Amino acid sequence: MVRKLKLDGLQAELSAVGALLKEATESGDYLGKYQFSRRKVALETEISAIHGTPEKLASVALLFGGSPVIGSRGISADFAGDALDKFQDLVSKTFAKTEWGSLGERGPIPLKHASHLMVTEVARGSFGFVLNEVSEQTEIADTALKMQVEEVATLLQRTASPNELDFEEAADTLDSRTLTALKNFFVTLDSNGATLRIVEDVADFTLDETAIRRGRRRTEATEIQENEITLVGVLAGVLPAHRKFELTLENGQTMYGSVSKEGIEQLSGLLARGESAVGKRWNFRIRRRIISPLNRPSREIDTLLEIIRPVE
């Protein structure tokens, strides 16, 4: 079970047991007081153990409501399969974009096998599913997939946010294929009259019908055009940990943006050989994304893909 859901359940039970313990104490029910005291200690111990053991693998609960769901009794099989497929596609493309650095406009998704989530439980309350990353080894740090599932949860929340600026910031991180996957997920939810609560290790939020319709409208009205260009400039600085760059073009303009994984590896290779790319003139291969959101001006987002060669 998702750690946060389990903690919420244990906290609720602890509160109920506390009330029963108080009642037993006030009424002189010594047997009840003994039993509830033991249960209270057991719950507190279990809660403490969970707090002391952070989850390192990806884990997320998708809890659906609305037209496809009948209380906690069942969910439309067609809808459930489609929604899970669309969510997995969004996770896979987000994972590949981050780890691979760029996605082609078509073709297989890189590293798709590494982003698979498994349905491990059926979640009650409304009706939904718990998706987990399955690993044969013990992880000592958060896995890349866990971080990307958290990123997807944040992306969904910002896309459906009442604040337009939240979506604009989220859109800056998208490419055309990830935008399509995001749109498809919202279309599936909206077309079926569904609501969604998402619970993972950090986030816990609900998208009602209004939020889902807002997310669909925004993603359908947003376009992302991508192309690669070659520029000459002087590399002013790089932040490898944050994958950010700054360079000065020949016309004197300053360009800022992100660096692909391959670009960071190339720059790290130069440093390992005792060379520095900073302060020198290079030919740069840049991917430029032009994002055109609903009723807002277009924005250019640049990503440094590769340092091609020095310019003498």
Image (cartoon, rainbow, N blue to C red):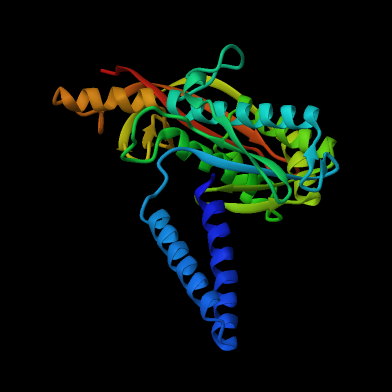
Residue sitting at x 54%, y 52%: 6
Question: Given the current orientation, which residue lies at the most extreme top position?
Answer: 107
At a point 31% along the width and 36% down the height, the residue shown is 240
* Corner quadrant of residue 223: top right
Nearer the observer, 301 or 8: 8
Establish if 45 lies above or below 82. below
Q: Nearer the viewer, residue 244 or 135?
A: 135
* Residue 41, position as x, y percentages in the image: 43, 67
Kindly tell me whether residue 306 is visible in this rendering: yes
- Residue 290 image offset from top left, x and y in percent: 61, 31
Percent across and percent down for residue 249 are 40, 31
- Pick the quarter of the image with the C terminus: top left
Q: Name the residue: 60% across, 87% down.
A: 27
Height in image: 278 above or below 56?
above
Q: Residue at x 58, y 44 (%)?
A: 153
Q: Is residue 84 above or below residue 151?
A: above
Between residues 221 and 206, which one lies in front from this camera angle? Answer: 206
Residue 99 located left or right of residue 307: right
Residue positioned most to the left:
274
Residue 275 at least partly seen: no
Question: In front: 246, or 31?
Answer: 31
The quarter holding residue 174 reads: top right
Farthest residue in the front direction?
31
Q: Quadrant of the N terminus?
A: top right
Count of numbered labels shown in the rendering: 0
Residue 273 relative to residue 173: left or right: left
